[in-house]
Image (cartoon, helix red, strand yellow):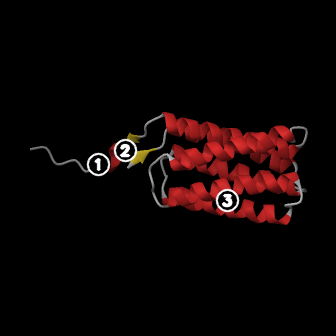
Amino acid sequence: MKKTPKAIGIINVIFGAITACVGINDIDYDWGIIALVCGLGLLVSGILQLVNKTGKVLGILQLIAGIAEIGLACLCIDYDWGIISGLIGIGMFVIGIIETRNKVGKAKHIIGIVFGALSIIMGFTDIDYDWGVTALFVGIALLVCGIVGLAVKPKEDDQNIDAAPMQ
């Protein structure tokens, strides 16, 4: 089994914690709930990646977070934070599908780069508002993790190799 580079987990933990804090600060508003769901999704994904619990567990978490974000986007699609939520939700959902199927490859990293870049653009558009900050932080996390995922070759997990007994 391939190990996820630790840098991806660390990035997700840091940006997930920051985004969750933005969400807690604005919990009374739509964009606060959106930020909280994004932040918790990134934070828990990062923790799972750091302890190397990737695959179906991580994929299901990302699917749930993606569905929640898409649902929130449908409730407020007329506003910028609804569009931001939809972008992030679709990105997390597609990455979750790929992760659940245990596909090792470039697709999930490329999707992270694309949706990260789109989120960063939306973030800079609304940088004066909390939902712009949310889009910026989540976009940076997706973009950087995608770049790191493409640049770093995953290592083999030594714990899953059945060694023959020495004779």
Dot label at residue 136: none
Neighbour tally class for label 1: few under 14, some 14-19, many 20 plus, Cα within 10 Å: few
Res 13 visible:
no
Q: Is residue 31 left or right of residue 96?
A: right
Dot label at residue 161: 1
Compare marks 1 and 3 and give the one earlier in the sequence.
3
Frontmost of labels 2 and 3 is 3
Dot label at residue 65: 3
Neighbour tally class for label 2: few under 14, some 14-19, many 20 plus, Cα within 10 Å: few
Tell me the amino acid under the disc marked 3: Ala
- Residue contact at pointers 1 and 2, CB within 8 angstroms: yes
Neighbour tally class for label 3: few under 14, some 14-19, many 20 plus, Cα within 10 Å: many
Coordinates of residue 94 in the picture (x, y in percent): 60, 57
Looking at the picture, does residue 106 appear above or below residue 98?
Answer: above
Tell me the amino acid under the disc marked 1: Ile
Q: Is residue 125 left or right of residue 156?
A: right
Task: Find the distance from the CA under tag 2 to the CA under tag 3.
Answer: 27 Å
Circle 1: element type: loop
Residue 73 vs residue 164, the one in the foreground: 73
Residue at the spot 57% in from the left edge and 41% down from the top edge:
9
Compare marks 2 and 3 and give the one earlier in the sequence.
3
Q: Residue furthest left?
A: 167
Residue bearing mark 2: 157
